[in-house]
Image (spheres, rainbow, N blue to C red):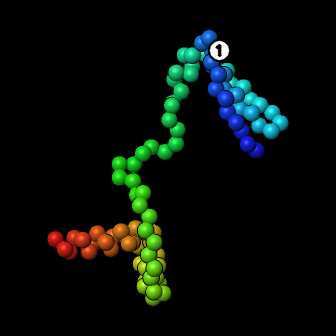
C-alpha cells in the first residue's frame, strides 16, 4: 500500500492527510498541539559514524581464521578487522 502525505493549514488548524489507493486518513490538530510534535524522527546521529565501506578479498584460509576469531570473541568481521588495524597502527608508534 502506498501512502501519500499532504500537510495543509487552515487559519490556525492543521490537517495532515494520508491518501492510499482506496481510502484516506485526515489528522486534524490545533496550532498548539502541532508545535509540540518533534520535527525530527529516526535514530540520533552518531559522534563518529562509520560511513566508509571497504571491500577486501581474502584467501580461504585467512577467511576461515577470521570467522574462527569472530566466533571465539563474539564480534563481527568488520569489528575484528578494525581491531587488527588498530593493533598494527599502535605498533608503529
Read off the residue under disc 1. Answer: 10
Work out whether residue 10 or residue 34 is closer to the camera in this orientation and state it.
Answer: 10
Is the residue 52 above or below the residue 87 in the image?
above
Is the residue 44 above or below the residue 63 in the image?
above
Furthest residue in direction left, as rendered: 93
Tell me where residue 17 appears, x and y as whole percent.
70, 28
Furthest residue in direction top, as rendered: 11
Q: Secondary structure at mark 1?
A: strand
Image quarter in which the C terminus is found: bottom left
> Is 30 on the left-hand or right-hand side of 40?
right
Tell me where residue 4 appears, x and y as whole percent.
70, 36
> Is 89 on the left-hand or right-hand side of 63?
left
Is the residue 7 above or below the residue 22 in the image?
above
Tell me where residue 59 appears, x and y as whole percent.
45, 86
Crowd band around label 1 with a 10 angstrom C-alpha radius: few (<14), some (14–19), many (20+) = few
Work out whether residue 38 or residue 15 is closer to the camera in this orientation and state it.
Answer: 15
Tell me where residue 57 appears, x and y as whole percent.
45, 79
Furthest residue in direction bottom, as rendered: 61
* Residue 90, quarter of picture: bottom left
Identify the residue at image location x=80%, y=39%. 21
Identify the residue at image location x=42%, y=45%. 45
Q: Is residue 68 visible?
A: no
Furthest residue in direction right, as rendered: 22
Identify the residue at image location x=26%, y=74%. 88
Image quarter in which the N terminus is found: top right
Amino acid at each position: 500500500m502506498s501512502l501519500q502525505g499532504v500537510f495543509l493549514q487552515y487559519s490556525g488548524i492543521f490537517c495532515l492527510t494520508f491518501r492510499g489507493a482506496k481510502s484516506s486518513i485526515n489528522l486534524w490538530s490545533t496550532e498548539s498541539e502541532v508545535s509540540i510534535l518533534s520535527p525530527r524522527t529516526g535514530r540520533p546521529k552518531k559522534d563518529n559514524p562509520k560511513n566508509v565501506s571497504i571491500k577486501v578479498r581474502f584467501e580461504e584460509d585467512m577467511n576461515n581464521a577470521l570467522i574462527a576469531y569472530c566466533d571465539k570473541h563474539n564480534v563481527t568481521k568488520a569489528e575484528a578487522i578494525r581491531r587488527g588495524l588498530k593493533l598494527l597502527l599502535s605498533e608503529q608508534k
